[in-house]
Amino acid sequence: MGDRTEVEIRSITEEEVEDFMVAGARGFGIDRTLNEGDGDRFLSVNALEATMIARDRGHIVATFGSYDLDLTVPGGESVTAAGTSHVTVHPTHRRQGILTEMMTRHLNQAIERGQPMAALWSSEDRIYQRFGYGQACSGLAIDIPANTVTLPSGPDDVTVHPLTTDEAAKAFPSVYEEVRLLRPGLLRRSEDWWELRVFLDAEHWRNGFSRLRYVSAERSGQPVGYIAYRQRDLGMDEEGITRIIEFIAVDDDVRRTLWHFITNIDLHRHVTWWNAPVDEPMLLEVDRFRSVKSHQVDTLWLRPLDVVRVLETRRYERDGSIVLGVDDPFLGRGGTFRLDVNSGIGTCRPSDEEPQVTMDISVLGRLYLGGHSAHRLARAALIKGSAEAVHTTDELFVTLSPPTCIEIF
């Protein structure tokens, strides 16, 4: 095991970007071969000062990074968030406090930069709760075996068309932005993010599948939805696979049109989608629902850093008041807060009142986007309070549309 006293933790320099990328990939068991320009592309979407390494005897033994994100919250507003990412610790240096020290620096830096929230996708479900992150969004992994189901087609006024990458880059952003404002959990995308995270079709992301294919749905000549997908040919004796990567539709007519298209591609009728919304209506429309295999997966995790600010940013579908006791043993950013909602707008302030419900900061992260029931969290002893107070909490935080996050970062 490495000697913890010899480990240096610090932000990276521009000269270390490529080494950081290789070391970070290695932490996930991937051999990364860099291409010309990869380092510059990395710097286009990653803040250099928020990207850290740990070195021991000249070797990078841990990595840690942060994206600057704008997260859509209930009501269509956005909250800025530190996108916790690139987190790895070499097996020789686990259990030596390196991750805890890097996480402390990361969250404090996010606070200094005015980011009231931190967000991540968790590679392991038991790592991040101790730092105050709570699982806020879920998705559905869907598998539709070939030639087993029939789905309704959309109306005649919605048509589908293949697009090149350049055509997709012009058509998709406006459609995505229209949907983003309506769906908590989606992230605002900059031009660099579209170019370098959505349309950059790196070979090491394909896992034996084809390049990305793009199809646009149009109504009256205007794009109203799209699918990005990959295909995998399995030979003459077996139906190929179509893997949905991104599926966006402005309404249900468009959604039905795109589902009908994607499940009827000759030779590739076995369709998978790893991260569909948990309320995907296709599961109710399909003629043989037992043939569709699905299970829930956790996606976005949230870590509130400024309770007042995040609670005042989102909107609420019901009015009411609650006094929240929030415990934050890792950072000490908790306390007692009174939330008053009038006409859907929340006003929050620190309070010296007796809390009506109490919870860990990670549980507030679970509640924040409306993806979890306060009743269920109380049954699991993650929220404590009277039945009436728990009911009020549930009424305030629940949303008609559950959150979804399609952005893996």
Image (cartoon, grey):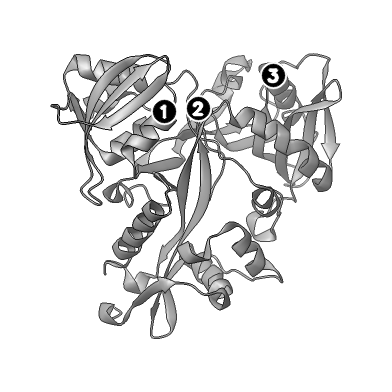
Q: Is residue 247 above or below residue 203?
A: above
Question: Do the numbered discs 2 and 1 sit on residues whose CB atoms are within 8 Å?
Answer: yes
Question: Do the numbered discs 2 and 3 sit on residues whose CB atoms are within 8 Å?
Answer: no
Of the numbered discs 2 and 3, the one sitting upstream in the chain is 3
Looking at the image, which residue sits at the far bottom?
Answer: 57
**How far apart are the two marked residues, 2 and 1, measured between alpha carbons?**
10 Å
Q: Secondary structure at mark 1?
A: loop
Residue 371, label in figure: 1
**How far apart are the two marked residues, 2 and 3, measured between alpha carbons?**
18 Å
Quarter of the N terminus within the rendering: bottom left
Q: Position of residue 16 (x, y in %)?
A: 54, 76
**How far apart are the two marked residues, 3 and 1, measured between alpha carbons?**
28 Å
- Left or right of residue 288: residue 262: right
Q: Position of residue 226 (x, y in %)?
A: 73, 33
Q: Quadrant of residue 252?
A: top right
Residue 151, label in figure: 3
Q: Residue at x 39, y 36 (%)?
A: 310
* Residue at image mark 2: 278
Of the numbered discs 2 and 1, the one sitting upstream in the chain is 2
Q: Secondary structure at mark 2?
A: loop
The answer to whether residue 269 of the structure is visible from this angle is no
Discs 2/1, front: 1
Discs 3/1, front: 1
Q: Residues within 10 Å of mark 3 (few under 14, many from 20)?
A: some
Q: Position of residue 216 (x, y in %)?
A: 79, 32
Of the numbered discs 3 and 1, the one sitting upstream in the chain is 3
Q: Quadrant of residue 46?
A: bottom right
Q: Is residue 156 above or below residue 385?
A: above
- Left or right of residue 82: residue 212: right
Q: Secondary structure at mark 3?
A: loop
